[in-house]
Image (spheres, rainbow, N blue to C red):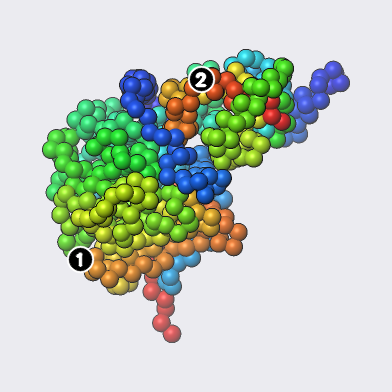
């Protein structure tokens, strides 16, 4: 029966048998991957990929969502009363998965425009070389395009619940058309 | 560990969204990365140090790495207070409350002599702190002031919403508040500059105010204060001494943080034009003559990017005599600096008038200069009745107790 299940799921199920604490994490991860993709790379519009996000970013995001000060209502309900050790387990698990490049055609002109805007706005100084994220700063490379564009608008309007006000300030004055270019660029990076 | 205060949560979410909507209409400050960051440092990747938002058990706290002067001892006093910042105690010290920043909680610690229990008193608040005054606990968040009349009895219940009376400005940046209750019966509250370096958007920022307990009688007592994160009243003069963070992005060596003394209400401490001991700001004060005119200079500078936090004048009898009335200051430690600085508690010995200040390291070892790593970030100080000193560690969500016993004579 295990052969019929994709490799990562097989590994998940095997782990369940051998280690109960880890098992809890794997079990919990199932409710994450239902939306965020079996390998942490989301195929659902508006739902972010979480594979290869920095561990600290994931940990902070999950804790603040559990506390009801970040995230969506669905996420808050899923995380209600989840103990720290499982949150740390989830963060470690998803931080180790590989990120994929977003699907779809690359528009070279838009990609280049996004690259220039990112350079001008020094996004790399926090989001790290290759935009792979660092500590509490999320990975942008390979993230879903429409998600990035939407989030940037939310940040700029101070409407991202629990979002860092420094991120909002970093986006003040940047027009929405530029967000589209930035989102296209980041989503196409490995 | 959980204690829900759902109605407060709902109210605070509502208030936040209304506030966010209002904020749309105001002019925006320049992006954070741009504020005062010179072209030469444009590619710098220095960024704020990430906090830890999960619990750290006592077994994972390397308390043995703390270094103290001879005769002093450190022990773990309480754990499980993720993001622990300022501590406030009731009169008999059976209860302590501890504020946080990002995680939005105020903890209630019940002190039963040799053990402590920790629970969450309030949650889902925006950067809350708390202060105990005249039998009640006051919680100050960015957008909220709540009074718990029965907190000391361990039955906090629903708080009284005092927000309206305190007239809090909306910006969050540098606006976490350290609040103290003075012997004059007033609450002392800082309002930081909502930027790294800027002329504040309104006259509500970069100052310290005091209020009556009911929020009336608002008075700005100090201006030009960029980001004060701690203060105490001098045990002999009663004057307010306060810490203040220097601005970022002017290089590894300055401008240094400050320890200031308010000799009379209304003094100006220089921000945004004049930093440390008279450094004219290269961005804001470029064309300004007399940038430091009428500015009160600090008692002492406290080191570059040190992040000076809690300040406590030691008044106990446990420590040796030379510590009596000496200021203990927690330096949470730098981020805007290539080599880490601070991550310690120091003493500042000075005359009652602030003259002749001398800084001496007291608790070190939170940071390892060899590899630029750290494990703890000392944030605030509190004194127990036996004269021992508590230090809160924001990074590991713990409180350490420092005690002294004279080394045995040979």
The residue lying furthest to the top in this view is A45
Q: Which quarter of the image is occupied by the C terminus of chain B?
A: bottom left
Q: From the top left corner, tell me how far across and down residue A171 is, in percent.
A: 48, 29
Does residue B35 appear left or right of residue B44 in this picture? left
Is the C-beta separation of discs 1 and 2 under 8 Å?
no
Crowding near pointer 1: few (<14 within 10 Å), some, many (20+)? few
Residue B353's tag is 1
The alpha-carbon separation of the residues under discs 1 and 2 comes to 56 Å
Which residue is at 45% across, 49% downward?
A: B249
Q: Where residue A59 sits: x, y (%)? A: 57, 35
Circle 2: is it few (<14), some (14-19), or many (20+) Cα within 10 Å?
Answer: some
- Percent from the top left, x then y, of residue A3? 86, 21
- Residue drawn 21% across the image and 43% down it: B209
User: Are the residues under marks 1 and 2 on the same chain?
Assistant: no
Asked if one can make out residue B9 in the rendered structure from this viewpoint, the answer is yes
| Residue shown at the point (34%, 57%) measured from the top left | B279
Q: Nearer the viewer, residue A114 or B82?
A: A114
Which residue is most to the bottom?
Answer: B410
Q: Quadrant of residue A16?
A: top right
Tell me the quarter of the picture where residue B165 sits. Answer: top left
Q: Which residue is mark 2?
A: A176
In the rendered view, would you say A101 is above or below A126? above
| Whether residue B176 is situated above or below residue A105 in the rendered picture | below
Q: Nearer the viewer, residue B82 or A112?
A: A112
């Amino acid at each position: 029966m295990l052969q019929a299940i994709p490799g990562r799921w097989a590994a998940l199920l095997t782990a369940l048998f051998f280690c109960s604490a880890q098992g809890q994490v794997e079990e919990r991860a199932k409710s994450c991957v239902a939306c965020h993709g079996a390998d942490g790379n989301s195929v659902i519009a508006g739902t972010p990929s979480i594979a290869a996000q920095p561990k600290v970013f994931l940990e902070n995001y999950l804790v603040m969502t559990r506390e009801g000060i970040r995230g969506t209502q669905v996420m808050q309900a899923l995380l209600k009363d989840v103990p720290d050790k499982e949150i740390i387990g989830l963060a470690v698990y998803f931080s180790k998965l590989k990120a994929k490049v977003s699907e779809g055609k690359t528009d070279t002109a838009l990609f280049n425009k996004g690259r220039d805007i990112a350079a001008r706005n020094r996004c790399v100084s926090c989001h790290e070389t290759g935009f792979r994220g660092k500590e509490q700063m999320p990975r942008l490379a390979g993230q879903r395009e429409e998600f990035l564009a939407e989030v940037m608008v939310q940040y700029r309007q101070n409407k991202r619940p629990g979002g860092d006000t420094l991120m909002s300030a970093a986006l003040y004055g940047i027009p929405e058309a530029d967000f589209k270019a930035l989102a296209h660029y980041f989503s196409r990076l490995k | 560990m959980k204690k829900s205060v759902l109605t407060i949560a709902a109210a605070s979410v509502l208030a936040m969204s209304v506030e966010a909507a209002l904020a749309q209409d105001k002019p925006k400050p320049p992006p954070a990365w741009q504020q005062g960051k010179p072209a030469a440092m444009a590619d710098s990747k220095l960024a704020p140090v990430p906090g830890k938002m999960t619990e750290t058990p006592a077994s994972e706290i390397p308390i043995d790495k703390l270094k103290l002067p001879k005769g002093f001892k450190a022990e773990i006093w309480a754990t499980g207070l993720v993001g622990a910042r300022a501590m406030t105690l009731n009169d008999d010290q059976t209860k302590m409350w501890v504020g946080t920043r990002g995680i939005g909680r105020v903890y209630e610690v019940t002190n039963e002599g040799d053990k402590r229990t920790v629970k969450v008193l309030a949650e889902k608040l925006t950067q809350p702190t708390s202060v105990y005054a005249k039998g009640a606990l006051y919680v100050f968040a960015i957008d909220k002031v709540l009074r718990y009349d029965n907190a000391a009895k361990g039955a906090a219940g629903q708080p009284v919403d005092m927000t309206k009376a305190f007239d809090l400005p909306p910006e969050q940046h540098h606006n976490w508040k350290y609040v103290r209750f003075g012997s004059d019966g007033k609450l002392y509250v800082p309002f930081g500059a909502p930027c790294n370096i800027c002329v504040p958007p309104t006259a509500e920022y970069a100052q310290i105010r005091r209020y009556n307990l009911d929020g009336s009688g608002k008075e700005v007592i100090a201006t030009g204060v960029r980001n004060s994160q701690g203060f105490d009243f001098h045990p002999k003069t009663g004057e307010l001494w306060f810490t203040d963070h220097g601005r970022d992005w002017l290089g590894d060596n300055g401008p240094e943080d400050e320890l200031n003394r308010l000799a009379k209400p209304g003094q100006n401490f220089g921000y945004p034009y004049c930093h440390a001991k008279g450094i004219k700001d290269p961005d804001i004060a470029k064309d300004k003559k007399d940038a430091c005119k009428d500015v009160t200079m600090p008692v002492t500078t406290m080191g570059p990017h040190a992040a000076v936090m809690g300040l406590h004048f030691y008044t106990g009898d446990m420590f040796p005599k030379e510590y009596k009335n000496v200021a203990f200051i927690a330096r949470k430690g730098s981020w805007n600096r290539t080599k880490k600085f601070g991550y310690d508690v120091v003493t500042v010995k000075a005359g009652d008038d602030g003259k002749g200040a001398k800084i001496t390291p007291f608790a070190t070892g939170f940071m390892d200069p060899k590899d630029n790593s750290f494990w703890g970030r000392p944030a605030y100080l509190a004194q127990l009745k036996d004269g021992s000193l508590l230090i809160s560690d924001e990074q590991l969500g713990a409180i350490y107790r420092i005690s002294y016993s004279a080394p045995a004579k040979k």
